[in-house]
Every structure is written in C-alpha cells, then in structure tokens.
Image (spheres, grey):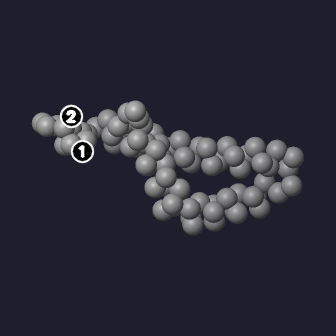
Amino acid sequence: MVSPAFAYALGWILMIAAMMLPTTLALLAIFRRVIGNRPDAGMLISAVVAGYALAWLAFDVAAYGSTSPCAKRRRHRVGC
C-alpha cells in the first residue's frame, strides 16, 4: 500500500513533468549551449533536471504539509 503523501508527491512530479516540459526543454537547450562540449555535460544537465524537480518537490512537500489535518482526511475520503 502506498502512503497518501507518497502518492501525492508522485502525482506532483508527474504533473510538473507533463505541464512544465515545454519550458524545461527550452531551459535545457539554452543550458546545453552554455556548457558547450564539456566532458561533464551529461552530469551537469542531470544536475539541472534533478535540481529543478527537487525544488518543485520541496514546494509540494511544504504545500502538502501546510494542509489542515481535516482537509487531508477529506481528500482521502476519511471522515473529519
């Protein structure tokens, strides 16, 4: 059984991948031009993608944590 917080975080990561992909691809294309032909280019791009996802995941955790306990129960169909 997956915890509600984990399911929420996974849904959030999927949403940012789907909704923000066009602007993220533009950012990565610009970043790729800036770093040029560096031997560690793949690692740098991976770091940018991971940092981007982690920043949004941190926002998700803060937003989920700031939700009232009653609202969380309603979201998961448990009585308040």
Q: Which mark is residue 75?
A: 1
Check the picture and name the quadrant holding the C terminus: top left
- Residue position for label 2: 69
Helix, strand or loop for disc 1: helix
Q: Which percent across, then down, holds residue 54?
A: 53, 41
Q: Which mark is residue 54?
A: none
Q: Residues within 10 Å of mark 2 (few under 14, many from 20)?
A: few
| Dot 1 amino acid type | Arg
- Residue drawn 82% across the image and 44% down it: 40
Q: Nearer the viewer, residue 10 or 35?
A: 10
Check the picture and name the quadrant holding the N terminus: top left
Q: Is residue 16 left or right of residue 64?
A: right
Helix, strand or loop for disc 2: helix
Q: Is residue 72 above or below residue 16?
A: above
Which quadrant of the structure image shows residue 5? Answer: top left
Q: Which percent across, then down, holds residue 41?
A: 79, 49
Question: Circles 2 and 1: CB distance less than 8 Å?
Answer: no
